[in-house]
Image (tube, rainbow, N blue to C red):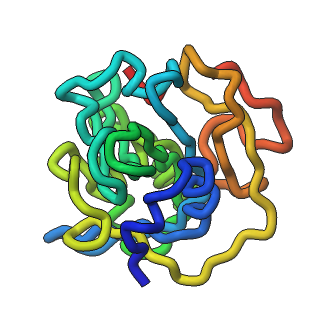
């Protein structure tokens, strides 16, 4: 079942928690890729210094203020596309960053996409559990780009499904890869999963780690 808009029209932390175990699917000409979400981060409102909405409405962050249940894709450091699901009511800027997936479908295609990255030339193949580990790697492996910004997540190439995958233990910790707002424990992960990016709670403390620059 594809998740309806009302799934996202809720408090962001609730959406973040409930996205764990859901399946992100991308249908491209090259093939279909899919993975179960095992790591997410919440970014909530203009008072969150790590959220792109912190400076107020801009052309770039317009999707955050728009309708829930749409993708907010942006380019981070000029290198990596990063995909978020917009949450809450229209006009309330918030989103959940999808940080890591457990690959389920289209793994050979994911491998080819990851291998084509110029910084991977001469390096050994990426293990399957690391193909979608980290939001930039995730988008590259899945084929998600800036062209998917503002797409509805209920139709078209990019959708999120409930396939009944359940995880018994979800761990909340501080967000990583950011310089401000590091005190908020708004990162949800599947405890001990090998596809989790960065340091993996509960085995290591979260490093002092913005939705991106």
What residue is at 36 percent from the left and 61 percent from the top? 110
Q: Is residue 122 above or below residue 23?
A: above
Residue 162 vs 177, above or below: the answer is below
Look at the image and tell me whether residue 158 can be seen.
yes
Which x, y percent locates residue 81?
A: 31, 39
Identify the residue shown where x is 19% and y is 68%: 28
Identify which residue is drawn at 56% across, 42% down: 41
Snapshot quadrant of residue 95? top left
Quadrant of residue 177 in the image? top right
Q: In which quadrant will I find the N terminus? A: bottom left
- Please indicate whether residue 26 sits to the left or right of residue 48 in the image: left
Compared with residue 104, is residue 200 higher up or lower down, i.e. above or below?
above
| Relative to 134, residue 76 above or below | above
* Residue 191 shown left or right of residue 15 in the figure: right
Camera-side residue of 86 and 144: 86
Q: How many marks?
A: 0
Q: Quadrant of residue 32?
A: bottom left
The one nearer the camera, 5 or 213, is 5
Q: Nearer the viewer, residue 127 or 83?
A: 83
Residue located farthest toward the right when viewing the structure as drawn: 203
Residue drawn at point x = 61 percent, y = 58 percent = 38
Q: Position of residue 82 (x, y in %)?
A: 36, 41
Q: Is residue 114 visible?
A: no
Q: Position of residue 113 (x, y in %)?
A: 30, 54
Q: Looking at the figure, which quarter contains the C terminus? A: top left
Q: Nearer the viewer, residue 21 or 197?
A: 21
């Amino acid at each position: 079942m594809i998740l309806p808009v009302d799934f996202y029209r809720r408090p962001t932390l609730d959406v973040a928690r409930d996205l764990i175990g859901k399946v992100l699917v991308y249908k491209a000409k090259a093939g279909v890729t899919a993975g179960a979400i095992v790591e997410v981060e919440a970014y909530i409102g203009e008072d969150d210094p790590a959220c792109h909405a912190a400076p107020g409405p801009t052309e770039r962050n317009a999707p955050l203020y728009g309708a829930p249940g749409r993708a907010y894709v942006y380019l981070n450091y000029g290198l990596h596309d990063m995909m978020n699901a917009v949450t809450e009511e229209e006009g309330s800027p918030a989103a959940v960053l999808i940080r890591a997936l457990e690959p389920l479908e289209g793994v050979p295609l994911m491998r080819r996409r990851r291998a084509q990255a110029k910084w991977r030339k001469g390096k050994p193949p990426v293990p399957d559990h690391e193909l979608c580990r980290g939001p930039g790697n995730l988008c590259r492996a899945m084929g998600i780009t800036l062209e998917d910004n503002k797409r509805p997540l209920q139709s078209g190439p990019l959708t999120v499904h409930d396939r009944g995958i359940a995880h018994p233990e979800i761990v909340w910790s501080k967000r990583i890869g950011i310089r401000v707002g590091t005190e908020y424990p708004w990162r949800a992960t599947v405890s001990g999963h090998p596809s989790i990016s960065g340091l993996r709670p509960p085995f290591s403390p979260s490093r002092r780690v913005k939705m991106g620059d």
